[in-house]
Image (spheres, rainbow, N blue to C red):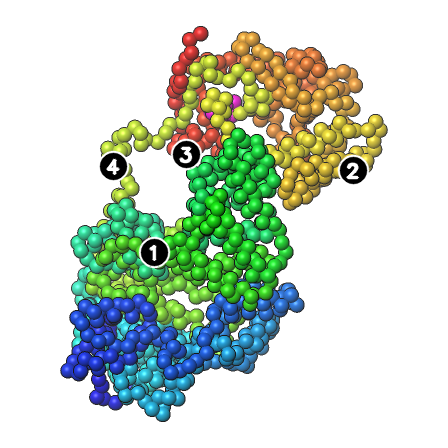
Amino acid sequence: MFDSAGPRIFALPPGADFPRLLVDGLIARMAGQPPEAMSRVELYLNTARMRRRVSALFQERGARLLPRMRLVTELADRPGLALPPAVPPLRRRLELAQLIAALLDAEPELAPRHALYDLADSLAKLMQELHVEGLHPSAISALNVSEHAAHWARTQSFLGIVAEVFDRTSAPEAEARQRMAIDLLAERWAEAPPSHPILIAGSTGSRGATLRLMEMVARLPQGALVLPGFDFDMPRAVWDQMDDVLTAEDHPQYRFRRLLDRLELTPGAVRAWVDCAAPCPTRNALVSLALRPAPITDQWLSDGPRLPDLMAATADVALIEAPSVRIEALAIALILRQAAEDGTTAALISPDRNLTRQVTAALDRWNILPDDSAGRPLGLSAPGRFLRQIGRALGQKLTADQLLALLKHPLAASGGERGTHLRLTRDLELSLRRHGPVFPTGADLVTWAGLRADPEAAPWAAMVGRVIDRFEPVATAPLADLVTLHRDLAETLARGTAAEGSGGLWEKEAGEAARAAVQALQDEAMHGGRFHPAEYAELFEAVLASGEVREAVQAHPRIMIWGTLEARVQGADLVILGGLNDGIWPKLPDPDPWLNRKMRKDAGLLLPERQIGLSAHDFQQAIGAPRVVLTRAARDAEAQTVPSRWLNRLENLMSGLPTRRGPEALGEMRARGAAWVRVAQSLDRPSAALLDNPRFQPASRPAPRPPIAARPDKLSLTEITRLIRDPFAIYARHVLRLRPLDPLRAAPDPRDRGSLLHDILERFVRERPAAETPEAARARLLTSAADVLQTGTPFPAARLMWLARLERAANDFLIQDAKHGGSPAVLETPGALRLDPPGFTLVGKPDRIDVLPDGRMHLFDYKTGSPPSEPQQEAYEKQLRLTAAMVERGGFADLGPCEVAGFSYVGLGSTPKTIETPRDKIDLDQEWARFIALITRYRLASTGYTARRAVFSDRIEGDYDHLARYGEWQMTDRAEPVFVGKEVDE
């Protein structure tokens, strides 16, 4: 194939369809040779996708023998090497996790145990990198770290684990096995170089092992390298200045400079693989200058004016600067839709999976399904979510919301009567919301089913009960037991009431991938030692996070979504580079818990900037396509974004070249992109017809006027305050008879705290002995509080916090309790008072009414927060004023009409406060008259129940705000009363 002496390096420019031109050049070089000569060619490629594409391109050329195509990572499987099998990556991580666990048991201050698997994974990656770069842990131990003594001491503790397992040759890591294969081939090729052609194509040599292999192949008699995206436009002086890894590692061409140095070649020795120009050579020259290394960007001033006209270079480039990620996704979807209609092959390239998922969702409105190379993360598939939910709940008591989340999952009971399962789950949810318990057990479900006249409830409840009871709390357990329990629970719940099987858990592509992941963990569990369930959940999620699901779908043949790695091996007429923001493209380097940049450089390891350099190379290749669209969002969900450093450089360079019409070219790029943004923004903008349709107008502030017969004729004392502040809530509750559902996850809230406080104080007052000292009263109060809280709330943290708050307020309560010298006459006793006219009953249950020594009454109302101020009582908070009026009018049968001396709001919150009002300071008769007027007004058909009439704060959310469509109207809007319902003829 080659007549000249090596080493040989060929390359293709950025923007070229690398696989197609690779095949063209290979066929051209083998022309005139026997057909079997092609089968003797060894072709090493960098990805499986590249191999598939090259095979397809060969097949397009007709029937012929193909070269022997292998992946660079499959070198260790080359016939004749006889290397030991590689240890599974999961096994190595589990072995490391055991060693780390033993270290943390001895020195718990080094790291939290919940990071056990993350630490093992990080150490395993460090071991892999050492193998790839041909280094030994001793290279790290020998570093001068005098400036990092404390951090280095912690690091050494963990790196000792790496040294312990690094030299195990009987079961090497895949990277160590690759290095062993390269060493063997180096020995054999030195003795007997192969005479047949061997090529490595598509690799940049960014890793040490691959770089060494490329060096070996390039020196073979018939060996050659074919590099992707080589910058033929970069001057020799720039190549020469990229000699410092700290400043040049993030340059897209740095890896080629390192390769040339190893081969003792200059950039001029790199030849074109085929005689084919780049799709847009002038654009490649512009990008090459824009991406010069940071220390020499001053060359923009000297080399920029030599560039060709930039209007022509960027004629097929558009720049979209969308106001949000959503608009960016819609604009991209519109471009892809246009490409589908025109028959253009188009591809979106982006490392941002959130953006690509939004684009896929946007395309669905036109029934376009793109060919997404990345598939879907296994953890986000239905089996993955189901298994993760179960894994997170292992080893703890199931809460009601956790149970219902499992029961409502689409895979739950997928092997039995799914309809019956959903019906019973709905009924169970209503019961748990209304009656609890917070932590349901199997016995609770059996009891619930026994109260139902439903023959299907008992077997279903028994099945669910058996699952619940297996989530018992445990400390630690062998990993094998936890995996077995996890799998058994998942299969049982997926099977449902069916006799056998596992429902749809392991079905389709996602189920098969999930089963393979679980089986792999089960096979290697013997190497994992003991895990706490929380640690196991972290481990399991990490295992699933490494998997992807590629489902068989009928995707559009011309619309693709690629990651940056896949884009290297594909070609498209239109390329969209999406998500061009810093932190996304390029992605920020992952934090290294072990070594800083200088330490990595001194040890001979790769710098974090290596990944940035590879991303820069991907960008340089992709932007060289025939037609390009660059997109970014000016703002994400949290804050303003920063443009990608490469886009920023390109814009700055063009803006500073007026003689090359750079500003005009940049403006045209933005104008082309802005047109797509305008169309995207108009997609969800209602048309004029919709705007005129009353159904699509924002709701006005409601004030419904129901029939008199439907209006409530009885309200409690506390509901009078609500009637004043938010009449619509009274309408929704008493006219529409809507009750807010209790939250699915029961949590300690102010309502529960208030109810328990009343129980505590009622018990304290009822059990008061004849003679009691203040110290004894305080001790008894706190004892009563502890007993009531123990039985009244299942939340230990809430018990401790509420008891501490009551302890702070105890002295103030005891002072108010003894202040007036009265004795309790009414404790949480209901009362009622009928008013005719207007035909209304006021009911109430005051916290406490004391009989004073002079025979008058004093009323108490206990508040867990701040008590209402006097102005609030005057306008809104009428509870005690109306209670006093009821007492004087005989509203409590046990008391009869009695004179009231005063009343007190006792606040027992974090800052205890009491507001006391003597009877002679207020006119109860006037209060009563105002109350009668209020009720009489709401007995008129013309009075509407206005939403949020006088709420305490605009930020307060009411139970019925969504029904009132609050948010479509503002608090300053005038209510529009509307008659609702029909009057019933008397």
Q: Which residue is situated farthest in the bottom direction here?
A: 191
Quadrant of residue 905 within the rendered picture: top right
Q: Which residue is mark 3?
A: 967
Stretch in magenta = 723-732
Q: Which residue is mark 2?
A: 779
Quadrant of residue 230 within the rendered picture: bottom left
Front position among marks 2 and 1: 1
Mark on residue 551? 1
Q: Which residue is situated farthest in the right direction here?
A: 771
Could you say whether the residue bearing mark 3 is in a helix, strand or loop?
Answer: loop
Front position among marks 1 and 4: 1
Mark on residue 450? none
- In percent of width and height, residue 493 lies at 50, 47
Seen at 68% across and 14% down, the residue is 893
Separation of residues labelled 1 and 3 (CA atoms): 42 Å
Mark on residue 687? 4
